[in-house]
Image (tube, helix red, strand yellow):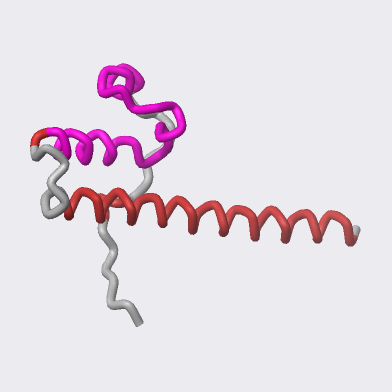
């Protein structure tokens, strides 16, 4: 199913983002997550193309894929947490 390949551009980064660049680009705090490095590129493309819907498609796709990968990581972390909590209550 899907046929999606791994895209290394969409890998989330740890939270060691360049805060000065995020502030300069006026990225809201709510969007300063592990995909903010892609959002910087996407917003730059959007401004340069006057938010044309047909432009910046690749950057938008990479950003959305990064967000999805972050979601999958959170789900996996929750499963591991629940598994550890269940093991701790059995003891």
Residue at 34% in and 27% down: 27
Viewed as shown, does residue 58 lie left or right of 25? left
Q: In this rendering, is residue 62 above or below 83?
A: above
Viewed as shown, does residue 7 lie left or right of 74? left
* Residue 1 % position (x, y): 35, 82
Residue placed most toward the observer, 4 or 90 = 4
Residue placed most toward the observer, 57 or 21 = 57
Residue at 28% in and 71% down: 4
The answer to whether residue 5 is magenta is no
The answer to whether residue 46 is magenta is yes
Q: In this rendering, is residue 25 above or below 60?
A: above
Q: In this rendering, is residue 26 above or below 41?
A: above
The C terminus is located in which quarter?
Answer: bottom right
* Residue 64 % position (x, y): 33, 53
Residue span colored magenta = 19-47
Q: In this rendering, is residue 39 above or below 68?
A: above
Residue at 32% in and 19% down: 23
* Residue 90 % position (x, y): 89, 61
Please state the total of marks drawn on the protein image.
0
Viewed as shown, does residue 46 lie left or right of 30? left
Q: Main secondary structure of the magenta part?
A: helix
For the view shown, which residue lies furthest in the left direction? 49
> Toward which corner of the image does residue 3 lie, by quadrant?
bottom left
> Toward which corner of the image does residue 88 lie, by quadrant?
bottom right
Viewed as shown, does residue 29 lie left or right of 19? right
Residue at 25% in and 55% down: 61
């Amino acid at each position: 199913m899907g046929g999606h390949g791994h895209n290394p551009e969409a890998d989330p980064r740890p939270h060691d983002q360049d805060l000065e660049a995020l502030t300069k680009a006026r990225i809201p705090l709510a969007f300063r997550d592990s995909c903010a490095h892609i959002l910087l590129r996407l917003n730059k493309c959007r401004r340069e193309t006057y938010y044309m819907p047909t432009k910046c498609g690749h950057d938008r796709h990479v950003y959305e894929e990064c967000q999805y990968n972050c979601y999958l990581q959170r789900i996996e972390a929750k499963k591991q947490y629940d598994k550890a909590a269940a093991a701790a209550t059995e003891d």
